[in-house]
Amino acid sequence: MHPQTAAVAAPVESLIRVIRGQKVLLDTDLAALYEVPTFRLNEAVKRNRERFPDDFMFQLTAEESRSLTSQIAMSKTGRGGRRTLPYAFSEHGVAMLSSVLNSERAIQMNIFVVRAFIRIRELANQNAELAARVERLELG
C-alpha cells in the first residue's frame, strides 16, 4: 500500500459503521472526506436517485439516528444541526458516488474509501481463518 494511501485509509476505516448488518459510511463523514457540504452531497444523490438502490444507500430511522447521536458527536436538531435523518452508504453506494460527484477530490477519496472497505473485509476473513485454526487445534 502506498504510504499516503495508508495514512488516509486508517481514518476512513474508523468511520465505517455497521448499521442494519451492513458496513456503511454516513453522509456527513463522506461529505467531510470529499470536502463538500453534506446537503450538496445529498442533493447530488437525490438528483440521481435511480443510481442508489436500497442496498447502496438508505436513510436512517429516527431511532438509529438517536443511537448514533448518543454514541458519536453528531449535532442535535434545533441547535444548528441537521434537520433530516442521515443517509448511510454501502461500499457499492460509495463507488456510485464517484459518478455523481465529479470532482478530483471525490474521485480520489472514493478510491481510499473503497480500499478501506476491502481492507476491513480482508481483516474479517483473516480473523475467521485464525479462529478456525485455533478451533482445530483445540479439538485435535
Image (cartoon, rainbow, N blue to C red):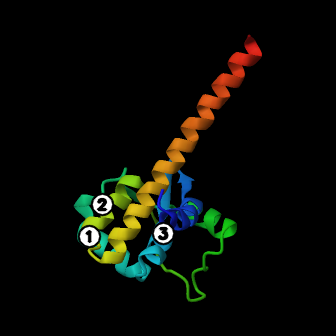
Q: Secondary structure at mark 1?
A: helix
Eye-nearest disc, 2 or 3: 2
How far apart are the alpha carbons under marks 1 and 3?
Answer: 18 Å
Amino acid type assigned to the residue bearing label 1 in the image? Val
Instruction: Please say if 16 is above or below 129.
Output: below
Q: Say which quadrant the C terminus sits in.
A: top right
Q: Which residue is mark 1?
A: 100
Q: Residues within 10 Å of mark 1 (few under 14, many from 20)?
A: some
* Residue receiving disc 3: 86
Q: Is residue 62 visible?
A: no
Q: Quick one: label 2, few (<14), some, or many (20+) residues within 10 Å?
A: some
Label 1 or label 3, whichever lies nearer to me, is 1
Residue 68 vs residue 17, the one in the foreground = 17
In the rendered image, the vertical position of residue 78 relative to residue 34, given as above or below: below
Q: Disc 2 or 3, which lies upstream in sequence? A: 3
- Percent across and percent down for residue 23 are 50, 51
